[in-house]
Image: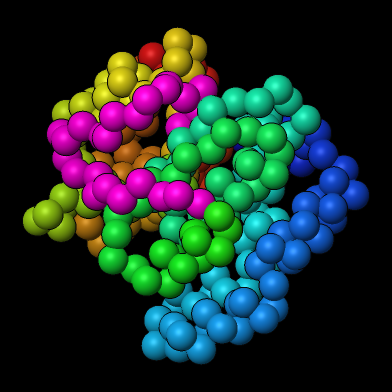
Amino acid sequence: MDGSTALSETSQASQADQDAFLAYARSVMTDERLEELAARHASAGSETKYLAPDRWLKEKWKLADLLKLVGTPPQRVLDLGTGAGHFPFVCRYLGHECEALDQPGIPLYDDLCELAGLDRVDHRIGPRQPLPAFERRFDLVTAFMVGFNTRPDGTLFDLEDWRFFLDDVRDRLLNPGGRLCLKMIKQVEREGPKYGDPELMALFESRGAHFIPKNRYAIFDPLR
C-alpha cells in the first residue's frame, strides 16, 4: 500500500479541523517562547528544527488521522520515544489521554515537552528489558522514528529481542485488542534485521501487523 494513499484515504478530518488545531498550538507554543528556547539551545544542532513546530504538528496530525484518533471516542495512548512531544500534544487536543516516554539527556526535548504541558516518563528502552509499569493499560502504543532497537554494541535487535518487546507491550501495557504502531527508520549502516527484511516482516505479520512500506510503518491491529 502506498503511504500517501493510505493517509489520504483514511482521512476523517477536514482542513478546518487541522487549522483550528494549529491555531490552538500557536497559542501554546508562542513565537516568544520558541525564540527563548532557540536562544537557550543555539548549540543543539539539527534538533533545533523542532523549534519550528508547524511542520511536525501537521505530520503528527496526519498520523493521528491514520490511526483513527480524529473524531473518535477517547482512548489511552502511550508514545514511546516521544522526542519533542508533538504526537501526545495532538492526541490530547483530540480528547485522548496520552502519556509520553523517552530517554533523558536531551535538554531541548525536555523544554519542548514542558512547553507542551507533558509530564514525560524518563526511560531508556533496551533489548529484553521490560518497559516501565503504568497504573492503567493503553488502547494504543506508538513509536515513531524507531531507534530504540539499537543494542549497546551498535547492532540491531535480533528476532528474540523483538519477540520480547512485542510480548511485553501486549502482556503488560495494552488492553485486550490493543494496537501498536511502529514507524521504522532505514538503519542501513547497522547489522541486524531491518524493516523490509523477510524474517523481521514475517515475525511482525505473524503478530498482527500490516505494512505501509513507503513510510516504513508496521501497524499491529491488534497486536497478537
Q: Quadrant of the C terminus?
A: top left
Tell me the residue at 54%/28% (across/down): 76
Q: Residue at x 44, y 58 (%)?
A: 83
Q: Position of residue 211 (x, y in %)?
A: 51, 32
Question: Is 83 above or below relative to 31?
Answer: above
Q: Is residue 137 left or right of residue 167?
A: right
In front of the other: 207 or 19: 19
Q: Quadrant of the N terminus?
A: top right
Left or right of residue 97: residue 45: left
Q: What residue do we see at 47% from left, 24% from top?
A: 138
Expressed as whole percent of the image width and height from the top left, the position of residue 201 reads 36, 31
Picture colour scheme? rainbow
Residue at (57% x, 48% y) in the render: 87
Reply yes or no: does residue 140 show up in magenta.
yes
Q: Is residue 166 visible?
A: no
Instruction: Give x and y (percent) for residue 104.
Output: 29, 59
- Which residues, given as a range, are shown in magenta? 118-141
